[in-house]
Amino acid sequence: MESMGTLRRTRYCGEVRLADAGQEMTVCGSVARSRDKGGIIFADLRDTTGLLQMVFDEDTPKDVFAKAESLKSEYIVVARGVLRERAAKTDKIATGDVELYVRELRVLSAAETPPFEIRDDVKAGEDLRLRYRYLDLRRPAAHEMIVQRSRVCQIVRSYMAAHHFTEIETPCLIKSTPEGARDYLVPSRVQPGHFYALPQSPQLYKQLLMLSGFDRYYQIARCFRDEDLRADRQPEFTQIDLEMSFVDENDIMTYNEGLIAEVWQQMLGITLKTPFPRMPWHEAMGRYGSDKPDTRFGMELQNVSGIFKTSEFKPFAAALAGGGAVVALNARGLAEVLSRKKIDKLTEVAKTYGAKGLAYTRLTAEGESSSFEKFLTADEQAAFRNALGAGTGDVLLVVSDTDWERACTALGQVRLAIGREQGMTDPKQFNFLWVTDFPLFEYSETEGRYLAKHHPFTQPNAADLDKVETDPGACRAVAYDIVLNGVEMGGGSMRINDPALQDRMFKALGFTEEKARQNFGFLMDAYRYGAPPHGGMAYGLERMMMLLLGTDNMRDVIAFPKVQSASELMTGAPDTVDLGQLEELSIALDLKQK
């Protein structure tokens, strides 16, 4: 293969335009495809900015033309020539008005035939593409997603710098603490039997930075959680993490609305209307059956429990007797498309989220059918239909359960399933929403105690301070999530800065004083020296990028992602290691069959 010699890039392929015609330039990149038309050769050159057509003909120096005849897909070349107006123009690429008439060509590296075509409409499966991710990333669409991710990070850094935030890196080898997801553990060679954890977030460190007087901190931070994967979850991910002192939750939300507006303006040219709407958690659950509601379409839930408080219909009566609820929605005008067969599928959706079933009434022009109304009194039936504003063409769907939240969640998922299937969600519409006033605690049946809904350092609502010990389930948190189109893009809270209140929180969570000090003693000690009021939040960068770029797969916006088994297919991680390495770490394997 040849060397570059004195040839050095003077322009990028995707940046030249018709105004540059007549200029001599040197470009470098990979051959996307080559076409020999007999006496004239066209070759598309690809670099990080896009494609540029190169041309070779009978007037091209013979040695250069001979090299052009050998060009194949993915050959790495450097070419010098004159940019000229293209005869057969195209709007399929940004440089479709011009082409490079090549006078000098060097082939820097040959390439074998790739295992799949390097093009956006590639038919290869995802596993194959991830195994050869370095080739997959040459595809313009895949490449551009990573470039745009970098651009968002630049916008974030500029915004933070303009608002007095200090970028500070926090450790990746930290102390393992409870109350979160499962940690990734790292053994210590110099302290046998001791382990670091990889951070699930920089939570404790950013609070300590507020106690260190930095006032405003941010970090584009790598985080790690050992949990089951899905389309919007990875074992390692990136947070846009921030913390602020001497503020309240309104200040934090206002600053973050400015950040989001800046990103959307620069990335998409869209001017967002601020402030964003706010909705308490209880209202979000009651109206949408979700703490991250998609508000692009209506079809809201209604609590119809009052209608059935004396009903003899056993499923409703049992739910209400158990302290639960009967919730319903009107799929208005969908009776013709929501057949009995489709309702059966929606029933399975409801059951997936804990419901025992899905009651229905279909009101078609040809007649009515219902799975439950024959068991109601005439007054109950009339009140039910009136409450939902029911009319011909509607489908009424009902979930009853002894747990209000479970009933709302199940019917909320049915709502989303209908919305997706009926095309009610416009991908070009961006409905931002703050969900506020989350529960401070959630009860774990498995552990038989209350757990922190977010984390143990979340500030309780001032009106609920007297309930922390006596009625923890009724306590609200000064916490807030930023939701976009049914996706939680980020969230945060005000933090506790009163040592006495933090002690009460630990006790409410079942920590003994010894256990609290063992896990969080360093933070408790820091509070003794003065802690400003502070709070913050974090965004999932990958989720933000998914929403910005219109993809539903987080792997698309990560350079080298993991798959469902938490494996990285290209390198083969995770892998076994040499026994000598384990011995150095004082680790002996005792693998048990699961």
Image (cartoon, rainbow, N blue to C red):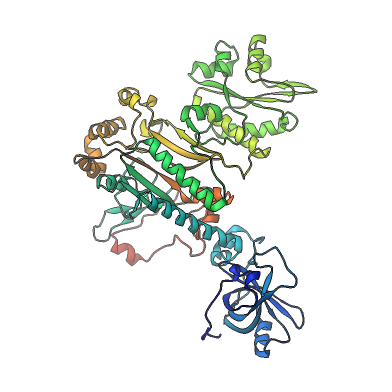
* Residue located at (46% from left, 29% from top): 280
* Residue located at (31% from left, 57% from top): 187
Q: Is residue 176 left or right of residue 384?
A: left
* Residue located at (31% from left, 55% from top): 173
Which quadrant of the figure has residue 499? top left
**How far across and down, in percent of the image, does residue 147 sit?**
52, 60
Using the image as rendered, state which of residue 167 and residue 348 is in the foreground.
167
Report the quarter where the N terminus lies: bottom right
* Residue located at (25% from left, 38% from top): 516
**How far across and down, in percent of the image, does residue 107 sit?**
59, 82
- Whether residue 225 is visible to the viewer of this picture, yes or no, is no
- Whether residue 410 is visible to the viewer of this picture, yes or no, is yes
Using the image as rendered, state which of residue 537 and residue 20 is in the foreground.
20
Whether 62 is drawn above or below 206: the answer is below
Check the image and name the residue furthest to the right: 366
**How far across and down, in percent of the image, does residue 133 sit?**
54, 64
Whether 23 is drawn above or below 317: the answer is below
**How far across and down, in percent of the image, does residue 507 sit?**
27, 31
Which quadrant of the figure has residue 389? top right
